[in-house]
Amino acid sequence: MPVLLPPALVCSLDLLRCPACRTRQLGADGRVLRCSVGHTFDVARHGYAGLLTGARATSGDDTAMVRARARFLASGAYAPLRDAVSRLAADSVPERATVVDVGCGTGYYLAAVLDQLPGARGLGLDTSVGALRSTARAHPRVAAAAWDVFRPFPLADGVADVVLDVFAPRNPAEFHRVLRTDGRLIVARPTGRHLAELRGRLPAMVTVDPAKEQRLHRALDPRFEAAVTEQVEYATPLDGAQALDLVAMTPSARHVRRADLDAGGFPPGQVTVSVRVTAYRPR
């Protein structure tokens, strides 16, 4: 008996374009995706499409990081941030919207948006195999595909009502190309106060560049205008396991030593979550 493709992926095939030819639509052919001239792309048994071509992209999200992120997000510590992202994403878009999450991680935020839009479908793009496995099972209406945000997306023009970019790299030109003219881009990024207590105790943690906000505006301004910004800031308590997962789910895990984690004053008891979430309109 043939193995069928995940229903969410089948429902997203009209969005996809062959990464090799860039213009031809992909169709299902057994357990692979194929364009009309014969380029084929495997669908992993975990449910995501492997669309990357050429040199493999490297990802900061290895299996340990993905597992730590899944545990930490399941604790509810970032629930207010999730709610802000999903509220801004679902505002004034069609109920049967198409939502593309670039750098989707575990699919946590994408699933929350789809819960706000009962008729919508979602597609998550990421380079991390572990993240894609999680995303493919994050929600019944979520499809997942391996892709590098810095390359032209394997998507047709103007197919997305919403593009999500939550703590992820950005590709403004591609965001603009795949969004509908009345769509919206949702960008969530940390402020300088984000996780300040952890950074105070773990100097090796990656810091937030003070010029990050200015660089964001310079990059997006030619193609997007900000419609609304929400500042999500609150203190959340941390136990030891949550604090370890919070460090382990970020690139800081590569810089922080075990001795730092065993030192006095860790975990800090609570940390400040401070994130700006902006909804942008295409120009």
Image: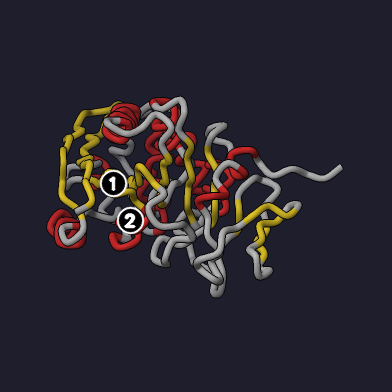
In the displayed structure image, the side of residue 74 where residue 207 appears, left or right: left
Q: Secondary structure at mark 2?
A: helix
Pointers 1 and 2 in contact (C-beta within 8 Å) = yes
Q: How many marks?
A: 2
Which sits in the foreground, 164 or 199?
Answer: 164
Of the numbered discs in the image, which one, if any, rests on residue 185?
1
Q: Residue at x 76, y 52 (%)?
A: 30
Ranked by sequence position, the earlier of labels 1 and 2 is 2
* Residue 49 visible somewhere in the drawing: yes
Applied colour scheme: secondary structure
* Residue 269 visible somewhere in the drawing: no
| Vertical position of residue 181 compared to residue 76: above or below | below
In the displayed structure image, the side of residue 53 where residue 87 appears, left or right: left
Q: Residue at x 70, y 56 (%)?
A: 32
Q: Position of residue 230 (x, y in %)?
A: 17, 35
In the displayed structure image, the side of residue 72 where residue 269 appears, left or right: left
Q: Position of residue 221 (x, y in %)?
A: 15, 58
Q: Position of residue 216 (x, y in %)?
A: 19, 57
Mark 2 neighbour class, 10 Å CA radius: few under 14, some 14 to 19, many 20 or more: many
| Vertical position of residue 253 compared to residue 52: above or below | above
Q: Quadrant of the N terminus?
A: top right
Which sits in the foreground, 67 or 31?
Answer: 31
Q: Residue at x 12, y 58 (%)?
A: 214
Report, in whole angstroms, how far the alpha carbon at label 1 lies from the one at label 2.
Answer: 7 Å
Identity, as a three-letter code, of the amino acid under mark 2:
Phe
Q: Secondary structure at mark 1?
A: strand
Q: Residue at x 39, y 29 (%)?
A: 95
According to the image, label 2 marks what residue?
A: 175
Identity, as a three-letter code, of the amino acid under mark 1:
Leu
Q: Position of residue 111 (x, y in %)?
A: 45, 33
